[in-house]
Amino acid sequence: MEELAISSEVTQYIKIRLGDEFFGIDIKYVDNIVRMQHITRVPKAPEYIKGVINLRGEVIPVFSLRLKMGIEEIEETKSFRIIILKYEGESVGIIVDEVREVANVSSDDVEKVFHSTSEGIQNFLSGVGKTENGLISLLDINEILND
Amino acid sequence: MDVSQYLDIFIDETKEHLQNLNTHILELEQDGENMDTINEIFRAAHSLKGMAGTMGYKRMQTLTHDMENVFSEVRNGNIKVDSDMIDLLFKCLDALEEYLTTIQETADEGTNDNEPLVKGLNDILNAKKGEEPKEEKKTKKSEKKSKKEEKESAKEDSAKAKWRDIKIDDSVKTVIAEGAKNNIKAYGITVYIQEACLLKAARAFLVFKALEELGEVVVSVPSAQDIEDESFGFDFSVIFMSDKPLDQIISAIKYVSEIEDAVGGEVDLNGEEEEKAEETVNEGVPAVAEEKPAVSSAPTQAPAKTNSSSNAPDKKSGKPVVNRTVRVDIEKLDSLMNLVSELIISKNSLVSVAGSVVGSSNLAFNEQIEYLESVTTNLHESVMKVRMVPIENTVNKFPRMIRDLSKKLNKKMELYMTGEDTELDRTVVDEIGDPLMHLLRNSADHGLESAEVRAQRGKPEVGSIFLDAYQDGNNVVIEVRDDGNGIDIEAVKAKAIEKGKITPEMAEVMSDKEVIDLLFQPSFSTAKVVSDVSGRGVGLDVVKSKIEALSGEIEVKTKLGEGSTFIIRLPLTLAIIQALMVVVGNEKYAISLGAIQTIESITPADVKKVQGKEVINLRGTVIPLVRLNRILDLEESDDGNHDMIVLIAKKGDRLAGLVVDELIGQMEIVIKPMGKYAGTTKLISGATILGDGEVALILDANALI
């Protein structure tokens, strides 16, 4: 019984899309998902910081996940979302092309093999998870939010 | 009894008492004869002992008890205050502070018995045993005096003996009559708790506990349950059965700290109480019965002095003994402040809605909005005031520090402080202590010269350090000044070159101000000898960053050979400011109104170029222009033919003209932090949420100049 419990450890990921690739964000970091809204630009900030938004009275910085991972930006579409992450006590928003679903990934199905097309992205991944709907690259939130 | 719920209060109060002791022992060193100071010290030590005892901190209690004994002898004139004794007392205070720190961290006092200190205190006590006769003389004198006063207070005492109002029912009468047969007397006792006491129920509990060791409580008014629930005023009365004499019982009650007074007498069932046995005791001067049997023979000594000091505010110290205050957790105040902030934001949105509804000529509506505005502004001010505390609590520890430094560095120096009552937001007061301490140490260590050098320069032998605080508009200014050597510009330059911070060529052309700014860079210390007082390179840069974190600024004025002044300027409040809303490019920005002197309209022809930089000549003053759109990486919207709106901003004695595209108006804004990811540029000091929910950034005018 015990062994079974350990081997079937399942982590939930929010499955998001950037271009035609799918990524997973560990649900434990996700505080909220909001629609695109007016973002106030912050001068002199790094390019990937798109600015700040007002989320229920708090001022929260918003990252472009594309720019942070070195992927070219595209024009905003209706499916764009801001995922609010809680990380080390601070809230940070990241912009993604689309939010798909919650994916269950068993720890058995995570491999350290990377299939991504672009080399630069690999630094931001912690592994690749197999789900019933195909492969998703699991994002390493530490890498994304730490410089 | 579980006392853990009182731990916070205990810690707070102990801190206060320790500070009090520190201050007064310093005074004692100056004037060893001042009875007011001695009494104040005695009172603080006694309260400390009582509190430590209540909380079960035995080691702390022992140490304070011995200190109290020493103070008591000092008060009785048996011991003369000398410098060694003061040193020992300060060491005791340090030890107590250590206990407190341990308690704060672990809720336990630790295992350090501080035996050398206890022994030192006892040595002082024992050494003076020989001077007994002198004491007697003194006691007599004060006894005479107090007897007179006691007569006056006797009337008052009978009014105070509320126990006489207790209705004794028949069953109790039987008990009392039974007792009388067995030589057990019935006493009526009324106990007064100090009005400043925060642990009324706990004190009452201790009184009951003390009483039960001596006999039996038969009636209590209010009931024991009410007392436990703290539903009583500041006094309670009991009928008490005991075979012990009344003065022993009263002493036992009085031994509990924070008991203002205890009045008692024998219950006479025939309606007449035995007035002879009546007696008052007082917590303020408990030396009497508490110490040794020898002194308890003169119990009347006690009420005389304390009655006057507890009924009327202590005139000498100029501060009321009892402050009517409520202790509030700072977090509650923070959340109150946040709510006020939200209210102001929502008020701002109402105002913007009212303004945008076309043709809204509804007078009543506008009137209500104006009313709401004045209410929120007043509310904000009140909450701010609640959060304001005098810097006193922080700066009070400095005289002691300077004294220690003076001994350590072997330099004579004196600290003069003014404006300790200047008030600042609580969070700022908490944070400002360290930077100030750094600056004072800096003055003591680097600033003041050695005695020989001072003599050569014709300065007084004792160096002076000044700490002046005052309010200046929306700022509070704190100055740390010394009459020492001042900053040696050439030495700083040499050091900077040596450290590779600047090149000799750069040093040639640098202004004095620029050189002094070098001091605020990380790891820069000019002290030739590294001491443990200051000068390990963690100095002024830390001070600067701390002050900037509080949205303040620091500047230095110095004259070689005459001394230097560090001027700290802090905003009164951190959370809400009056701001000017402006448009640059197509973005809205807020600029603190406090930084702006005037708003000018400038024609392009008035802009001149000096050394490649744009300046304007405004009524005879040449002011550099700062084009905000360029600084903020925005596109040029000005075609160069229109008049420009220029905000004249001031920082210290420097001015700058900030060019903006449009003025929106004045607004009360709530400053929100930007977080570590977006808050990296110095140009932006924070963000605020506008009436329409959009975020506008706050420009730091200081960083622009």
Image (cartoon, rainbow, N blue to C red):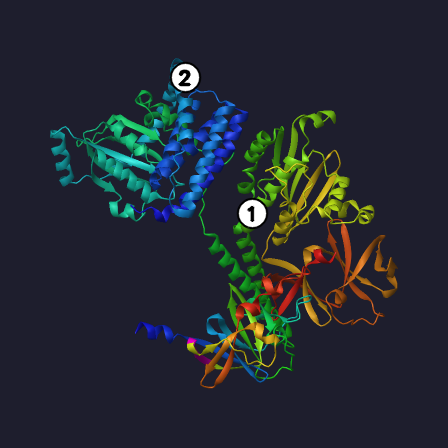
Quarter of the C terminus of chain B within the rendering: bottom right
Nearer the observer, B198 or B294: B294
Check chain identity for marks 1 and 2: say if they share one: yes
Mark 1 to mark 2: distance in Å?
A: 45 Å
Using the image, tell me which numbered label, if any, was put on residue B138. 2
Question: Mark 1: which amino acid?
Answer: Val
Left or right side of B518 for B22? left
Dot 1 or dot 2, earlier in sequence: 2
Q: Is residue B307 among what the camera can see?
A: no
**Mark linked to residue B429:** 1
In x, y percent, where is residue B87? 50, 28
Give B142 or A95, whichever is nearer the viewer: A95
Q: Secondary structure at mark 2?
A: helix
Element under label 1? helix
Say which amino acid is labelled 2: Lys
Q: Hey, which quadrant is residue B688 in on the image?
A: bottom right
Residue B419 - label: none
**Residue B238 picture quarter:** top left
Picture quarter with the N terminus of chain B: top left
User: In the image, B613: left or right of B587?
Assistant: right
* Position in image of residue B518 (x %, y %): 72, 47
Q: Position of residue B590 (x, y in %)?
A: 67, 63
Chain holding disc 2: B
Residue B602, given in percent of the width and then of the height, sits at: 83, 63
Is A106 one of the magenta-colored residues?
yes
* Label 1: few (<14), some (14–19) or many (≥20) C-alpha neighbours in 10 Å: some
Q: Residue at x 83, y 72 (%)?
A: B639
| Segment tinted magenta in the rendering | A102-107
Horizontal arrangement in the rendering, residue A6 relative to residue B208 (left or right): right
